[in-house]
Image (cartoon, grey):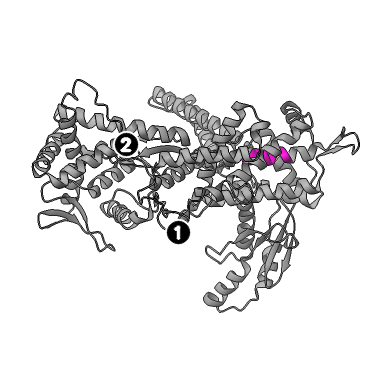
């Protein structure tokens, strides 16, 4: 394949080569048939037709991929890694997998990016070849081998061996123009993979509480990110909808609403209903026996008991959906009951492969490296959470053909999930080098007293109450700022919803998910600092700049095609580079699943924009009359590019901005 510059994708080389080979093969078959040597000319024609079909398919696919890639935002960090990877390979061809470290520079005087590989290479040469080469010499040799490219203006060697990289302004300007013309497009990812995300997962007959907030918000945002990046995403709600607790619920239903089969029972408060049945289960021996009988009849699929179970599940679903509607969450329900019929086969498979031991009537599986075994069958023949989690894992791997599995579950389940994953690996369901199975763990929500978030009476905080409190506080905040005097009733309602739910989501997502975080309405509704309130307000201000200058979308689109974005002012240059870091931020999150990086980036982008706006006039007005004298269109385009990236960032986080706030 011919050489390409750093910023063009090279993933098409294999397809191009196959096209060449197929074209040659078609020509060969033509000649072969014309000479009359073939015993079956018809067979050759069939083969020829197949090859032509494959050729057409590949050419079309290659064209589509090229078109998509041409519109994709370029990950500048990845481009620089390609360039420096090639330079290191040329300078030190004898090194296998040499260290490659490229990062954005922290200070403008050190350029835009830095390659810091020289120091590590110096250590490798000393250890493996006993060659003592100072890092600065290595850096110089790497710099001299940098291939021709369109993004680097110059490099400088600094300190002990840092290579400071200065980007070309015309390259950055061109990428910003592409963003404005094509919209915010994801970086090219290659093969489209299937991602299965397990999140939210409340229990039937129990209300969603603040503990479900993190899994629901984090999981939704992860799905949005993978979908934007072009993956095929399956969003699963692993409901706790099966098990012994349904025995006591059905028994209580029979007593309280004996005609439940013909008249839909008015169960208003399912939480109270659950507590009543639990109290009876703990105190009434006769009721307890009947509850166990109900479990047996339910598991044997008795129609009356299935109907009772479905009624209880439906009441819960309606309550869950209210919360999902508020938070704009999309899920496919696939609870524990979905996997019930598969559990028998799971036990048999582990038995057939010799992994099962019997301990006091239980069937258990020890997984190397984990001290506590999995219990896949109880002594009474019942299944456990371990069995259903193994069945779910196998189904997602073998039936759904997931390439990436992500479990958004609290940190307390870490050992359990790692044991289940290791068991799946042990039995041969997946190879971790091929399939990624990850636990996206998260900490607990704390109150302002730094203890587990509870109500004043010590109860768990209901999620619906929390959301309603958020709406009330958001409206109070808007009225404090006298927004009710300038916004219509409809605009005020939209701003209330945007701020309330946006702030709750952002407060969670802006913290490292691995840590506990303190839930504080006062902090999350503060319009200063790294909060959704600040970012939403900044966004509406940016969007208003062009509108107040009487520049409409059509004029902006025309300017994006015709104007050259001038980046002469240091604040223009800083903002332009910050906008173009969006793809590398997303790439990092796709790898480590830490969404707070996106929040930090959006805050950095907003503050960088403020610096730009304070120093660079976008619209110049006459000081006395206030009339617009001059519109600096290239700066308005920088405003537009900033807003476009912020809007996509908000969308990934599940936050809905408003036009007026």
Q: Nearer the viewer, mark 2 or mark 1?
A: 1
Q: In the image, which residues are magenta?
A: 639-647
On the rendered structure, is 355 left or right of 433? left
Q: Secondary structure at mark 2?
A: loop
Q: Nearer the viewer, residue 512 or 573?
A: 512
In this view, 128 is above or below 550:
below
Indicate the quadrant containing the N terminus: top left, top right, bottom left or bottom right.
top right
Q: Is residue 373 above or below residue 248?
A: below
* On-image quarter of the C terminus: top right
What is the CA distance from the residue labelled 2 to the residue labelled 1?
35 Å
Foreground residue among 487 and 183: 487
Determine whether label 2 and label 1 are within 8 Å by CB. no
Whether residue 149 sits left or right of residue 369 in the image: it is right
Query: Please, what secondary structure does the residue beneath circle 1 have?
Result: loop
Task: Check disc 1 and report the residue beneath it.
Answer: 450
Which residue is tagged 2? Answer: 334
What percent of the width, then of the height, locates residue 378? Answer: 14, 50
Residue 477 in percent (x, y) is at: 59, 41
């Amino acid at each position: 394949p011919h050489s390409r510059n750093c910023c063009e994708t090279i993933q098409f080389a294999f397809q191009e080569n196959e096209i060449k080979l197929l074209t040659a093969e078609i020509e060969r078959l033509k000649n072969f048939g014309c000479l009359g040597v073939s015993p079956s000319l018809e067979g050759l024609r069939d083969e020829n037709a197949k090859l032509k079909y494959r050729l057409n398919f590949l050419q079309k696919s290659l064209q589509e991929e090229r078109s998509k890639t041409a519109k994709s935002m370029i990950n500048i960090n990845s481009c620089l890694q390609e360039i420096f990877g090639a330079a290191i390979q040329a300078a030190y061809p004898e090194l296998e997998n040499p260290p490659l470290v490229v990062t954005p520079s922290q200070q403008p005087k050190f350029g835009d990016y830095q390659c810091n590989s020289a120091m590590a290479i110096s250590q490798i040469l000393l250890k493996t070849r006993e060659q003592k080469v100072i890092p600065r010499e290595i850096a110089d040799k790497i710099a001299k081998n940098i291939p021709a490219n369109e993004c680097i203006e110059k490099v400088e060697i600094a300190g002990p061996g840092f290579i400071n990289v200065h980007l070309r302004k015309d390259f950055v300007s061109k990428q910003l123009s592409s963003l404005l013309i094509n919209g915010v497009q994801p970086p090219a990812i290659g093969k489209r993979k299937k991602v299965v995300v397990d999140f939210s997962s409340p229990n039937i007959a129990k209300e969603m509480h603040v503990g479900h907030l993190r899994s629901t918000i984090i999981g939704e945002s992860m799905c949005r990110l993978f979908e934007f990046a072009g993956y095929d995403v399956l969003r699963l709600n692993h409901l706790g909808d099966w098990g012994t607790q349904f025995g006591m619920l059905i028994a209580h239903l029979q007593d309280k609403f004996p005609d439940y089969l013909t008249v839909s029972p008015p169960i208003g408060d399912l939480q109270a209903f659950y507590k009543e049945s639990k109290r009876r289960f703990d105190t009434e021996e006769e009721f307890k026996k009947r509850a166990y009988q109900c479990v047996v009849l339910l598991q044997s699929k008795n129609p009356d008991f299935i109907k009772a179970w479905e009624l209880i599940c439906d009441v819960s679903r309606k309550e869950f959906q209210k919360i999902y509607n508020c938070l704009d969450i999309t899920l496919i329900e696939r609870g524990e009951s979905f996997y019930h019929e598969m559990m028998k086969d799971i036990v048999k498979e582990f038995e057939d492969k010799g992994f099962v031991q019997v301990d006091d009537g239980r069937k258990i599986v020890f997984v190397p490296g984990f001290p506590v075994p999995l219990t896949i069958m109880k002594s009474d023949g019942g299944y456990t959470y371990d069995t259903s989690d193994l069945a779910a894992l196998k189904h997602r791997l073998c039936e759904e053909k997931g390439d990436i599995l992500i479990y958004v579950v609290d940190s307390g389940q870490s050992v359990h999930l790692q044991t289940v994953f290791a068991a799946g690996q042990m039995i041969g369901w997946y190879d971790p080098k091929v399939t990624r199975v990850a636990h996206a763990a998260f900490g607990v929500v704390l109150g302002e007293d730094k203890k587990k978030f509870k109500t004043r009476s010590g109860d768990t905080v209901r999620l619906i109450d929390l959301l309603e409190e958020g709406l009330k506080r958001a409206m109070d905040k808007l009225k404090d700022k006298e927004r009710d005097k300038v916004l219509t009733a409809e605009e005020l309602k939209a701003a209330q919803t945007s701020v309330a739910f946006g702030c709750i989501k952002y407060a969670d997502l802006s913290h490292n998910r691995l840590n506990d975080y303190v839930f504080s309405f006062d902090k999350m509704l503060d319009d200063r600092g790294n909060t959704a309130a600040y970012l939403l307000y900044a966004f509406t201000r940016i969007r208003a700049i062009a509108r107040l200058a009487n520049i409409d979308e059509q004029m902006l689109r025309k300017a994006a095609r015709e104007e050259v974005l001038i980046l002469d002012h240091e604040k223009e240059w800083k903002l332009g580079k910050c906008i173009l870091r969006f793809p590398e931020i997303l790439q990092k999150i796709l790898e480590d699943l830490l969404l707070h990086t996106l929040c930090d980036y959006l805050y950095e982008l907003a503050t960088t924009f403020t610096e730009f706006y304070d120093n660079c006039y976008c619209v110049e007005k006459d000081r006395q009359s206030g009339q617009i004298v001059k519109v600096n269109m290239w700066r308005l385009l920088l405003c537009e590019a900033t807003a476009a990236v912020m809007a996509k960032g908000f969308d990934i986080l599940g936050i809905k901005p408003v036009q007026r706030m």
